[in-house]
Amino acid sequence: MNRPIADRSILIDLVQKKMPFGKYEGRYLCDLPSYYLEWFASKGFPKGRIGICLETLFVIRTEGLHEILDELRARYGKP
């Protein structure tokens, strides 16, 4: 992912939005297992905002930036 995050609401979506389809439909994005994100990374992320969210979450996880998710959960929580 070489694009800067221009819209910080994408980070908030990681802790507030649920997966809209697939095996983990209905699960909060931040709670998706890493292997599921790795699968998307190998097959291609979906188009649109959900793809941007999943790719952002993948980068956070693979770069060891888990504390970002902890801060987002504490600040914005799940609605």
Image (cartoon, rainbow, N blue to C red):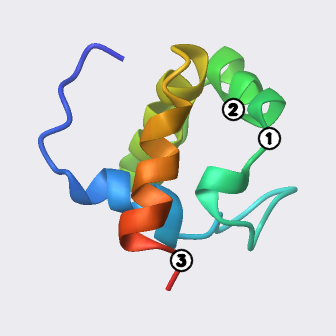
The residue tagged 1 is 33
Query: Which mark identifies residue 60?
Result: none
Disc on the earlier residue, 3 or 2: 2
Left or right: 43 with respect to 2? right
The residue tagged 3 is 78
Q: Amino acid at mark 2?
A: Leu
Residue 54 point in image, percent of width and height: 53, 41
Q: Is residue 39 visible?
A: yes
Q: Nearer the viewer, mark 3 or mark 1?
A: 3
Q: CA distance from mark 2 to mark 1?
A: 7 Å
Query: Split into 4 quadrants, where in the image is the N terminus?
Result: top left
Q: Is residue 47 visible?
A: no
Disc on the earlier residue, 3 or 1: 1
Q: Looking at the image, is 68 positioned above or below residue 31?
A: above
The residue tagged 2 is 37
Total of numbered circles in the picture? 3
At a point 20% along the width and 36% down the height, the residue shown is 5
At a point 20% along the width and 51% down the height, the residue shown is 8
Q: Amino acid at mark 3?
A: Lys
Q: Amino acid at mark 1?
A: Pro
**Residue 61 figure quarter:** top right
Q: CA distance from mark 3 to mark 1?
A: 17 Å
Residues at marks 2 and 1 touching, judged by CB atoms closer than 8 Å: yes
